[in-house]
């Protein structure tokens, strides 16, 4: 038994994926730790090149210590996935006490030639890049395997101190996870990537996504640039769906099930922008699925002059594809404070919002607005608004616009 139950894949033999899997197998029965350090091998390659997802059980700590883990061109899988979910796993059993920690320069890097990118409605080679495009027997759309870190029904978890570059879809996606801390994540993706000297489109490059059923989570410090929304809370369940299929989510869900509600989320210090002009933070829930008790304190839009995001913060949507505007009460208990924006709208309300507070919002875009009620004032009730202004308005004026999304 290793001292302190800490195992290093460098001490094992085989491919990079096999060495990491052996270290995990040694650590798991002991509630141990796997520490991945700079790769040590005769071929001299320092980067860990994995062909499949690193599968993490509960009661385990994974430390990525000053090294890079990259998906190989053979991989069509996540960087990291909780071991309780996957293809054909129809019953996702909960696991606990899972911690993913970066030390120093800890990097997760997408493949040089990704086999697939984008979400489950993006056709490979048509809407989003993928070398599997047109190949017989291969799924011709993206799916959850393109997500970087994917955890489902994990309770008491930590993800911290990682740089995630060129993710094939959402960099981190959490489904039905609770009692977690996410801290100091950085992202780099721009929706376009040079591959063999040719610009290629890679869609759905969100940073962090909290999906249906996530509760009691602290998010502290997200930075960088993403191809899509930097942070999204997306409570979407428009129909019953089974677990274990290649769809948007790996854990499935039931339509209008209260267990899908997203609630009790604290978000601090979001510093970055969407390179493709989407949103920095997006809150989206479908009718019958609650999103409640959300605190967002501190957002700084760092977009350059060449990029203008649609909104720094977007709440809800009017589009039928997302179920339209949520009924009053489904989206409530928000506290949004201290927002600096360069976007067209600092805060765009496209759905309903009630019993909430908006305080301290400044839009520095002279052609933008601070608060944009796309869905109409009838869906914006019992919301205290203070210290909201545009760059060319008098201090203290609450500027509210009503425009199309």
Image: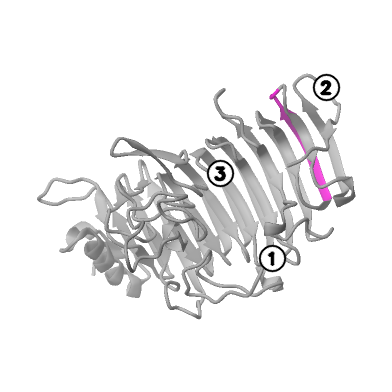
Res. 237 image quadrant: bottom right
Mark before the other along the chain sequence, 2 or 3 = 3
Q: CA distance from mark 2 to mark 3?
A: 29 Å
Up/down of 323 relative to 30, above or below: above
Residue 402 position in % (x across, y down): 83, 38
Q: Is residue 89 magenta?
A: no
Residue under the image location 82 percent in, 31 percent down: 387
Classify the position of the N terminus by image quarter: bottom left
Residue that appears at 47% across and 38% down: 190
Position of the C terminus, as image quadrant, is top right
Vertical position of residue 13 compared to residue 255: above or below: above
The location of residue 7, given as percent across then percent down, is 27, 62
Tell whether 261 sits left or right of 273.
Answer: right
Q: Is label 2 or label 3 in front?
A: 3
Q: CA distance from mark 2 to mark 1?
A: 37 Å
Looking at the picture, how far across and down is residue 332, in whole percent?
A: 79, 55
Q: Which mark is residue 395?
A: 2
Q: Residue at x 43, y 78 (%)?
A: 88
Instruction: Indicate the quadrant where residue 385 lies.
Output: top right
- What secondary structure prevails in the magenta region? strand
Report which residue position mark 3 lands on.
230
Bounds of the magenta segment:
355-365
Mark 1 Cα shell of 10 Å, populated few (<14), some (14-19), many (≥20)? many
Front position in the image: 301 or 325: 325
* Mark 2 burial class by Cα count in 10 Å: few <14, some 14-19, many 20+: few
Label 3 Cα neighbours within 10 Å, binned few <14 / some 14-19 / many ≥20: many
Residue designated by label 1: 261
Q: Position of residue 287 (x, y in %)?
A: 75, 63
* Label 2 vs 1, first from the N-terminus: 1
Q: Does the magenta segment cover residue 358?
A: yes
Seen in the image, is 320 located left or right of residue 181? right
């Amino acid at each position: 038994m290793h001292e302190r139950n800490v195992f290093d894949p460098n001490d094992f033999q085989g491919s990079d994926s096999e060495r990491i899997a052996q270290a995990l197998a040694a650590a798991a029965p002991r509630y141990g730790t796997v520490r991945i350090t700079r790769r040590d091998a005769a071929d001299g390659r320092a980067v860990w090149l994995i062909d499949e997802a690193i599968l993490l059980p509960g009661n385990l700590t994974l430390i990525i210590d000053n090294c890079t883990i990259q998906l190989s061109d053979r991989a069509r899988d996540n960087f990291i996935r909780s071991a309780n979910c996957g293809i054909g796993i129809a019953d996702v059993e909960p696991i606990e006490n899972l911690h993913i920690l970066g030390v120093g320069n800890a990097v997760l890097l997408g493949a040089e030639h990704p086999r697939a990118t984008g979400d489950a409605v993006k056709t490979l080679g048509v809407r989003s890049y993928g070398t599997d495009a047109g190949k017989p027997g291969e799924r011709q759309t993206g799916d959850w395997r393109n997500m970087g870190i994917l955890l489902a029904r994990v309770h008491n978890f930590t993800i911290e101190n990682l740089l995630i570059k060129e993710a094939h879809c959402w960099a981190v996606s959490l489904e039905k996870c609770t009692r977690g801390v996410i801290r100091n994540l950085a992202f780099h993706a721009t929706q376009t990537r040079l591959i063999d000297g040719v610009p290629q489109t890679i869609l759905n490059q969100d940073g962090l996504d909290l999906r249906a059923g996530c509760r009691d989570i602290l998010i502290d410090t997200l930075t960088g640039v993403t191809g899509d929304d930097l942070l999204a809370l997306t409570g979407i369940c428009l129909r019953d769906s089974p677990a274990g299929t290649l769809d948007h989510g790996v854990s499935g869900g039931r339509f209008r099930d209260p267990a899908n509600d997203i609630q009790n989320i604290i978000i601090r210090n979001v510093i970055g922008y969407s390179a493709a002009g989407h949103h920095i933070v997006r809150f989206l829930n479908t009718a019958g699925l609650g999103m409640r008790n959300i605190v967002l304190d501190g957002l700084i839009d760092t977009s350059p002059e060449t990029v203008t995001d649609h909104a720094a913060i977007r709440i809800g949507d009017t589009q039928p594809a997302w179920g339209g505007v949520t009924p009053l009460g489904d989206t409530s208990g928000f506290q949004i404070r201290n927002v600096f924006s360069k976007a067209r709208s600092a805060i765009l309300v496209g759905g309903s919002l009630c019993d909430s507070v908006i305080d301290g919002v400044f839009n520095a875009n002279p052609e933008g607005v601070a608060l944009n009620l796309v869905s109409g004032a009838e869906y914006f009730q019992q919301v205290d608004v203070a210290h909201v202004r545009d760059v060319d308005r008098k201090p203290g004026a609450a500027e509210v616009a009503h425009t199309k999304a």
